[in-house]
Image (spheres, rainbow, N blue to C red):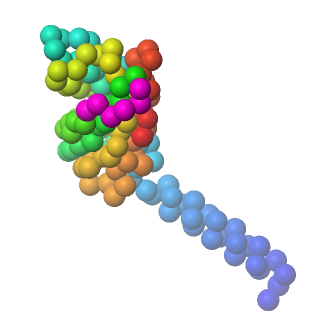
Amino acid sequence: MSPFAAPRARRFVGVALLAASAAAPAHAASGVSLELNRFEQKDAACRISLLIGNPGDKALDSLKLDLVFFDKDGVISRRLAVEAGPVRAAKTSVKLFDLPETPCDSVNKLLLNEVTACGGAEDCLALVTTSSRVKSVEFSK
């Protein structure tokens, strides 16, 4: 065997791995972004506006979020399960939901604890990124 055969074989394996990763589902590669966009007090509830971005070419029938809210002292104040789907492909949308009997200014942090369903992807939590535009409220996972 020629001394040049091994490097060529490694290059072939590298190209094959690159081609395999390019064939992965588009929604897994591009992901879904969740932006905490706005808090608005509505009577005794805090109305939450969540901006959901799906730049991929795969729609999600379901996007179930397990959200945990923390107060100013870092103590868990509420937990809420939300269905944010369906999420259309190549689309940004807004979902609104109310956090009952909670003043908006009492929330300091929002944790995406889990994504319990995301339309068939295997690791739903890894599919999602979080950010916040609400002043003084962190949104993380």
Q: Is residue 53 left or right of residue 101?
A: right
76 drawn magenta:
yes
Which residue occupies the foreground of this view, 33 or 65? 65
Q: Position of residue 106 (x, y in %)?
A: 32, 18
Which residue occupies the foreground of this view, 2 or 128? 128
Q: Position of residue 29 (x, y in %)?
A: 45, 47
Image vertical order of residue 122 relative to residue 63, above or below: below
The residue that appears at 20% across and 44% down in the rendered structure is 61
The residue that appears at 15% across and 10% down in the rendered structure is 43
The residue that appears at 22% across and 36% down in the rendered structure is 80
Q: Position of residue 123 (x, y in %)?
A: 37, 55
The magenta span reads 73-78
Image vertical order of residue 38 relative to residue 32, above or below: above
Q: Is residue 91 visible?
A: no
Q: Quadrant of residue 59?
A: top left
**Number of numbered discs overlaid on the protein picture:** 0
The residue that appears at 43% across and 35% down in the rendered structure is 140
